[in-house]
Image (cartoon, rainbow, N blue to C red):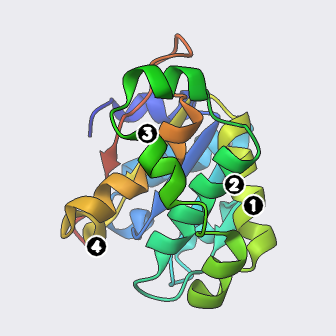
Amino acid sequence: MTNSIREIRQADCILITGSNTAESHPVISYEVIRAVKRGANLILIDPRRVPLARHATHYLQAQPGTDIYVFLAMAHVILREGLADTEFLEQRVEGFEAFRASVTENTPEAAALVSGVPAEQIEAAARQRKRDSPADAAGGPGHECNRLHGWLTGLPSCCALRYSRSGRPVALMASTARH
């Protein structure tokens, strides 16, 4: 992990994808539940109904192998609705305009057709991700197998630019893999 386990409890929004955290990392799961009880929002993207699903603010049950479409659709919503700090991104991210253009067709409706996650749920999760700060992102083993997929796990947070800008500790990418 790029941050301490204790810092999870300071997050206002936690995104977990492709991980049965309760089974593979019970201490981290405990801290996530503790954060949720404190008022944090949990966005969980997983085809399985893992134990943390009952604590999730947004549980997006994507079909196996389709969560990448959900991430791209979340980025689409964040950019479409002006929720990203585009001035900051344009100044500091090489290829940002090309990325922005590439997600225009990755609508929540298109992602819903592929992933099985209703478009309204994708939009709500993207808006939640932007509202909350700081935020942690955690990905499971599927995301470690593909560099692009792993990068996309953190994409909604990068688009919302919550990393290192809130003045509070934040994980750039936390992996809860190995189950």
Q: Give the foreground label among 4 and 2.
A: 2
Question: Is 133 placed left or right of 109 in the picture?
Answer: left
Q: Nearer the viewer, residue 99 or 63?
A: 99
Labelled pair 1, 4 in contact (Cβ < 8 Å): no
In the rendered image, residue 80, in percent from the top left (x then y), is placed at 71, 49
Residue at figure coordinates x 40%, y 84% from the top left: 65
Question: In front: mark 2 or mark 1?
Answer: 2
First in sequence: mark 1 vs mark 4? 1
| Residue position for label 2 | 77
Tag 2: residue type? Answer: Val
Evaluate if marks 4 and 2 touch, with contact meaning CB atoms under 8 Å apart.
Answer: no
Pair 3/1: label in front:
3
In percent of width and height, residue 32 lies at: 54, 47
Q: x%, y% of residue 63?
A: 52, 88
The residue singled out by tag 1 in the image is 123
**Furthest residue toward top:** 167
Q: Judging from the image, what secondary structure is the residue with disc 3 in?
A: helix
| In the image, residue 64 above or below residue 85 | below
N-terminal-most mark, 4 or 2? 2
Amino acid identity at mark 3: Phe
